Amino acid sequence: MSAMTTGNTSRADANRRRILDVALAELLRDPDASMDQIARAAGVVRRTVYGHFPSREALISTLVDDAVHALAQAHAAGREGVEDPAEALARSVLAIWHIADRYRLLVALAQRTVTMQGIRERLTPVRESCAELLRLGLEQGVFSSPLPTPALAYVHEQILFALMEAVNDGLLEAREAGRSAAVTVLTSAGVPATLAGALVGKIGG
């Protein structure tokens, strides 16, 4: 590949990344932001935006993919090196919420353009990792639930979605949401509320 081709590819990649970063900021500011608005904010012409993303839905879908990737990394990093399943679950939820809080308005927006089934499919690796952690906790007697682990992992996923909506609707303070999410997830896995609250408080959620 020639130096000119490499340079053009690098510029195209940089343009694409800038468009995505600006689009996220614009859509969080104005969920109805058009491709024209995004192009102006990114300092490019509309044709450039459409050159990377054929539609507004494709742009939002790519932002959702980025968000899911960030959530998966946060989930893995949060539980890394932690042996106790309850602490690992709490740390992973706190780490996920730190990322999810940035994207919570995007998730609400994505539900208009990306089906919930599509969002769930993207989250499958995170959900499977959560189910494995829950299975370990159930085997050790740390958790207790009448649900099979895959179903309980779905419940935890929906708890996080519901809390994002609660923050969006002004029903829950954003600064309290991470701790609330971790405690709620732990209690839904059978951890007594007092112990769950103490554990999350110790972690610093």
Image (cartoon, grey):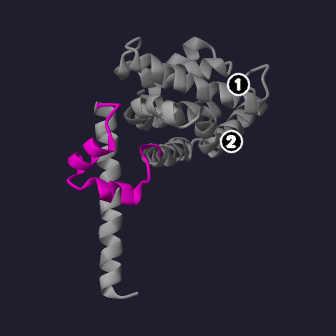
Where residue 56 sits, quadrant-wise, is top left
Q: In this rendering, does residue 192 appear at all?
A: yes
Q: Residue at x 61, y 42 (%)?
A: 126
> Which SS does the magenta portion mostly show?
helix
Q: Position of residue 127 (x, y in %)?
A: 65, 38
Residue at the disc numbered 2: 128
Q: Quadrant of residue 23?
A: top left
Residue, disc 1: 143
Quarter of the image where the N terminus is located: bottom left
Q: Is residue 149 left or right of residue 19?
A: right
Q: Element at badge 2?
A: helix
Name which residue lies at 44% across and 53% down: 54
Q: Nearer the viewer, residue 164 or 110?
A: 110
Q: Is residue 71 magenta?
A: no
Q: Is residue 135 left or right of residue 66?
A: right
Q: What label does residue 198 carry, if any?
A: none
From the viewer's side, name the closer residue of 134 and 196: 134
Q: Residue 205 location in percent, x, y? A: 42, 26
Residue 17 on image: x %, y % = 34, 57
Q: Secondary structure at mark 1?
A: loop
Locate residue 197 relative to residue 133 in the image: left or right: left
Q: Amino acid at mark 1?
A: Phe
In the image, what residue occupies the spot 46% across and 28% down? 108
Give the number of the mark in front: 1 or 2.
2
The residues colored magenta run: 30-57
Q: Position of residue 8 (x, y in %)?
A: 31, 75
Judge whether residue 35 is colored magenta: yes
Which amino acid is tagged 2?
Answer: Glu
Q: CA distance from mark 1 to mark 2?
A: 17 Å
